[in-house]
Amino acid sequence: MVEPQYRLRAHNQYLTFGVTFGIPGMILAIALVLIPLLTCRKKASYTFLLFVSLVLVSMFSDDTFSSFTGAVFFSYFYTLLIVTNSNNETQRRGEEIP
């Protein structure tokens, strides 16, 4: 049974983006998640691809960014996987990591 305070929530992150920010805001929010994936498609690690896929699918059944836990989970691992991937690319080219 859903508690009364959560009964009026969309339970879908895409719908929540659409209702809160409108169609342009929803497109922008989704684009901001996908831009790093699309710009380094050839260099992206499988771990990063798996994580982004997991988050995008989980957004259908839960408004992930509306809870503190979901927002921290996404921001921590998204940043960690992007930075780790860029460090690996720098090491492959033979550059020194600061």
Image (cartoon, grey):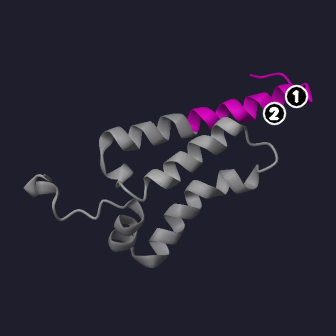
Give the residue at x 80% y 42%: 43
Q: Which amino acid does label 2 sit on?
A: Glu
Q: Mark 1 points at which residue?
A: 92
- The spot of residue 73 in percent (x, y) is 43, 37
User: Compared with residue 10, is residue 50 higher up or lower down, i.e. above or below?
Assistant: above
Magenta span includes 96: yes
Q: Which of 37 and 2 is in front in this view?
A: 2
Main SS of residues in magenta: helix
- The spot of residue 55 in percent (x, y) is 50, 48
The answer to which image quadrant residue 15 occupies is bottom left
Q: Is residue 93 left or right of residue 38?
A: right
User: Compared with residue 33, is residue 74 higher up or lower down, i.e. above or below?
Assistant: above
Give the residue at x 70% y 38%: 46
Dot 1: element: helix
Q: What residue type is labelled 1?
A: Arg
Q: In this view, does 51 lie to the left or right of 42?
A: left
The answer to which image quadrant residue 90 occupies is top right
User: What is the magenta range?
Assistant: 79-98
Which numbered disc covers residue 89? Answer: 2
Give the residue at x 91% y 25%: 94
Q: Which of 87 and 49 is in front in this view?
A: 49
